[in-house]
Image (spheres, grey):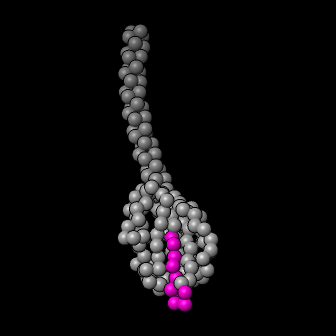
Amino acid sequence: MNFKKTFSNKKNSVFQKKIFDNKAQSGTVFRLMVDAIIGLVILMIILSVLGYFESLRVDTSRAEFLSIIKSATESPDGSVISSGILVFVKGTSFTATQLQSITNYSSDCFVFESNLGFTEILGSGKIIEIKQNTETKIHVKCVPVSDEKKIDCIISFGKKLEEGI
């Protein structure tokens, strides 16, 4: 009888162990699923932070571009003002009319040029359109024109300009 009782207890303990093992395995799967979700949330946070900083770089580049144009038009002496490396995204465009509104000079005063293959110059140099995301330097040279209150400005994307009038 003692043998039967011991065997029965071992049988119950093996059965109970299997139940606990199954519960442990399901707990492990659940824990793995929770860890995967937490990992995805952290990845999404990192990607959104990187996107934010990239958009900040683009906004800063645009502001520096406009600042350089304003600086060159305020002292048109033929010197070349160059930027650091600026970031522009695909589809960005600048027009002479936009520059007219921030400098109070006629749009006829501004001409765009570029030696970069991913830019397109339109309207006899009055519009530049960026065809792909890029990082480049901008060079601006403004010179006074005769006695009139007029200047001529060349805004170059990537192509270094020569100093002088």
x and y percentages locating residue 103 in the rendered image: 49, 83
Residue 58 in the image: state x and y as whole percent. 48, 64
Give left or right: position of 160 versus 114: right
Q: Residues in magenta? A: 146-155
Rendering coords of residue 52 (x, y %)? 47, 61
Counting every numbered tag in the picture gives 0
Whether residue 43 is visible, yes or no, is: yes
Relative depth, front residue between 10 and 31: 31
Q: Is residue 152 magenta?
A: yes
Q: Quadrant of residue 27?
A: top left
Q: Is residue 76 left or right of residue 11?
A: right
Does residue 92 lie above or below 3 as drawn?
below
**Which one is in front, 49 or 16?**
49
**On screen, 120 above or below 68?**
above
Which residue corresponds to the image point at 60% horizontal and 71% vertical from the top-left? 81
Q: Is residue 154 above or below residue 36?
A: below
